[in-house]
Amino acid sequence: MSQNAYIKLVEGSAVPSVSLEELRELLTAYRGQLELTGRQLDWEYDDKGFPYTIETAPKGKDTWFYLKGNHHAYRYIVTGVGTESRDGQERHYIQVSLPDGATHGDKSKANEFCKHLARKLKAELHLFNGRVMYYNPRK
């Protein structure tokens, strides 16, 4: 059974919505940060910190893409964007899904990516285990 985590863009978030292309750019920028860290450490950290390639499936090209693992410990992470109606308002979210064949490595990397994205977007993160982390400013 697949598992899902959600990064919900709520009031006080850095942006009100994120497109699929913007999500792809955020993940690419994250990999770039890891590459810079690797240069400082004189180690190829980007391959270890982001052991995936970004792939697009023809049937989901407008709503989701997947990260394909390039190491035996990592297989797939599916990411996409969507909207939900809550309290009469439309709210955007990023969904991170682990398919049935996902490994423990995929889950730990997905948690890492979710936390990074939620922190960067000042969003509300609903983790795979049901817990909620608030990175948005709350009163």
Image: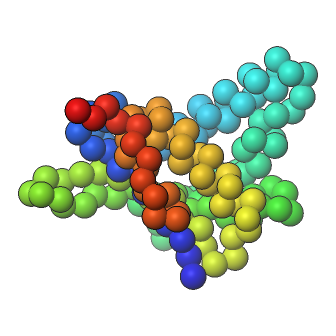
Identified at 68% across, 55% down, the residue is 108
Q: Residue at x 69, y 70 (%)?
A: 102
Q: Residue furthest front?
A: 139
State the quadrant of the N terminus: bottom right
Q: Is residue 59 visible?
A: yes
Residue 84 picture location, percent across and down? 25, 61
Answer above or below: position of 59 versus 123: below
| Of the pair 107 and 35, the residue shown nearer to us | 107
In the rendered image, residue 130, in percent from the top left (x then y), is placed at: 46, 64
List the single residue furthest toward the left. Answer: 88
Which residue shows up at 81% across the image and 43% down it? 48
Q: Is residue 51 left or right of residue 29?
A: right
Residue 5 appears in view: no
Residue toward you, 81 or 55: 81
Q: Farthest residue toward the right?
A: 42
Residue at 67% x, 27% y is 33
Q: Does residue 53 sit above or below 123 in this rendering? A: below
38, above or below 97, in the image: above
- Image quarter hosting the C terminus: top left
Instruction: Give the mark count.
Output: 0
Q: Residue furthest top?
A: 40
Q: How is the image coloured?
A: rainbow
- Residue 34: image quadrant is top right
- Give the image location of residue 109, x and y in percent: 67, 52
Report the side of 33 relative to 135 (left or right).
right
